Amino acid sequence: MNLTSEPPTLDPALAQDSVSFTVLTGLYEGLTRKDADGKVIPGMAESWDVSDDMKTYTFHLRKDAKWSNGDPVTAHDFEYAWKRVLDPDMNPASPYAYQLYYIKNAQNYNIKQDNPNHISDPNQVGVKATDDDTLVVNLENPTPYFLSVTSFWTLFPVHQSAKSNSAWAAEANTIVSNGPFKITTWKHGNEIDLVPNENYYAKDEVKLQKVHFVMVKNSATELKMYQTGQLNYSGFPTGEIPIEQIAKLQQTNKDELRIKPIASTYYYNFNTTKEPFDNANIRKAFALAVDRQQLVDKVTKGGQEPALGAVPPSIMGEKQSFREEYPDTDLFKPDVAEAKQLLAQGLKEKGWTQLPPVTLTINEGTGHKQIAEALADMWRKNLGVDVKIETQEWKVFLKNRQSLNYQIARSGWSADYNDPMTFIDMFTSTSGNNDIGFKNAQYDELVKKALASGDQHERMQLLSQAENILIKDNMAILPLYYYTGVHMVNKNLQNIVMDYQGMVDYTRSYVK
Amino acid sequence: MVRYWGGKLGSVLLSLFLLATATFFLMKAIPGDPFTAEKAVPPEIKAKLMSFYGLDKPVWEQYLIYLKKLVHLDLGMSMKSQYRTVSSIISDSFGFSFRLGIFAIVVSVIVGVGLGIVSAMHHRKLIDGTAMVLAVLGVSVPNFVLASLLQYVFGEELNWFNVAGLNGPLDYVLPVIALSSLPIAYIARLTRSTMLEVLTAEYIKTAKAKGLPNRVIILKHALRNAVLPVLTYLGPMTANIVTGSVIVEEIFGIPGLGQYFVDSVSNRDYTLIMGITLFYAVILMVARLLTDIAYGFVDPRIGFRSRKEVSR
């Protein structure tokens, strides 16, 4: 498999990118795992009890779980690992520590600076190993998706030998892991090898003799390596298949090319604090004037699905996909005539005869420019407005977007967990990821209610109402399409699973 | 002699200091920081990270701290690759660029000088024409085009070589060809033209008149003079090739230094940017120094004297 670049770390507490996560998937295992259908199944915990208020989880660890060095995996290892992530004095700090904020007092323990409610006693954090096999977790709120959170990388256990060697996760020979594989080689910037962990409790299920990762940046080279057999897996999530090759590969490698919808949305941000997009009707006009089907067929060409909402179809709702329960076609319908009318109305409200100059800001990277040009073309044809496109280097772009220094800006968001909340809570007025200047008291209230509720039916209704406010009423963002994970798998390689998020699980794969 | 080396060393240190200063402040002027990401890290966690890496201090203070460490030859820790020192990243990746570069230089010099001599000796004959057409091609075809072409023909279609990676001796073949095509062409043309000049010189005629065999004339007398411009060119070229060709490395998936340099800037991995920049500068200066020394060997008239002494 190609990782494209060096994983910044193999410490579960510090990892925050798909490259590190992909390697960690083989090396570690959390309390729970997910099967091929995304269902939560037992991992290090063989069973668990949930209290009636859904705020206390008691995990019973399997007794045959062992680390790659033969030590038993105990509940204490989990307590240690989670408190390590939350340790306010951990250096460097864990960037994904907030994945554990579901746990009681976790946030107030983790954050010391400028926090009057800081808790300095780690024993008050809601995670406790009552004996070697039992881990009791107390949560802040009933969190129906908590069992999916426990399979997340940041919550993987860490061997306690990390205490004495802070640089343990930088080299292969000091990494002790508890998952299906262990690491044997890590040539920095070049390759990583994993081989089966003979101490793993389900070692019979692990069939691959070796997992070999390379780090090749060029996507054309990656494809050539796949076609000459140097790689058995190519493309998403850690590699890339060149867009211009997809159509050809659909003919030549029909059995191997896979296009899988993933839980990410591609959209444009409107800066709702700056003219002209402080006007809802002008925002709506721009959103309604876009032909999304044409965009995915002619420009992105990766089998993407046109998006009218923020929450992608692979996110679960109450019983089935959230999008099936609350279709995004209820949010709005693209319509050029109506778009023109909305634009005229918006201009009237503003007292303008014509639109001020509009600049669309995008970042460098494959495809963004083509998409921007296609949209500018549609706006010119359908609304008669000229939109200038400005490309910026990635971090310059992010800085400008975060400080609301733009009019329209490209954006993309991927799920952290399988629940619509991960796409909704980012637009509350206090969220650090709200890059659109959107402030709506009713929206904040709905999110707060949904966070406190343990009733899935009620939660989904609240989240759907929030999405309605965001898009149907305000069109604060301009949804374009739901991402797909385009990848190729050698036809002899079976049971490589891409999950709802687009992350790949190769641990139970085998060669036919 | 001492004065000469003292002066050299002084100017090297001064250049390094100026370069470090300029790079440091330019780098800090770019918007963004190592922790800017699509998913914003909560401000409190980001503050902790910034203070861990000393990025919360005023820029001039960061600069002084950096200089102080630099004097002790401490390049610091990478801000992107956790718990890896900048010097270990440089030494790991430079190994690949260096080995590849040395092969490319050896091949360039041998083939280039060889072609040049053969052309000069067969001046205006078919063999000369062919060699010079090849040389023009070598200069004008960009190495990324050649690299992709080689990869496609010999890697993908004929399957003689791996398309990427640098793990066995055979893996060196294609990237070395791609890297050395331009220097070969350049060196061949240089050698040919100076050779033609030298061959008409009086001392060559004398040697011929003495009845020395052609081989001796060429290798012992003519080549020695003809190779001087090649040496001049070789200095900067060596530095250039050894520090890694970003594009060729990218195409052949070689984990060399060039790739890290580009990535370090887009990651805002400040310590790594500084480390690689300074390392490049040192390599360049060492290469120039070596060129000076080589001059001395080839042409004893060029000695280790400072300019001042010459003017006296």
Image (cartoon, coloured by chain):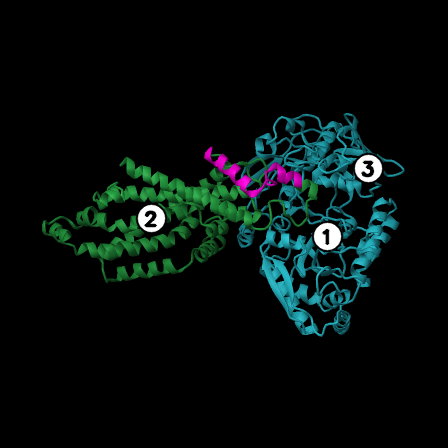
Chain colours: A cyan, B green
Identify the element where label 3 is drawn: loop
Q: Are marks 1 and 2 on the same chain?
A: no
Residue at the location (62% across, 66% down)? Answer: A388
Identify the element where label 2 is drawn: helix
Q: Amino acid at mark 3?
A: Leu
Residue A155 image point, x, y percent = 72, 37
Q: Amino acid at mark 2?
A: Leu
Check disc 2 and report the residue beneath it. B234
Vertical side of A243 occupied by A126: above or below: above
Q: Are marks 3 and 2 on the same chain?
A: no
* Majority secondary structure in the magenta region: helix
**Mark 3 residue crowding within 10 angstroms, few (<14) / some (14–19) / many (20+):** many
Residue B300 image point, x, y percent = 21, 42
Check disc 1 and report the residue beneath it. A434
Whether tag 3 and tag 2 are in contact, CB under 8 A, the answer is no
Q: Relative to residue A94, is residue A438 drawn left or right? A: right
| Marks 1 and 2, how far apart at CA | 55 Å
Q: Relative to residue A17, is residue B123 drawn left or right? A: left
Check disc 3 and report the residue beneath it. A139
Of the residues tagged 1 and 3, which is closer to the observer? 1
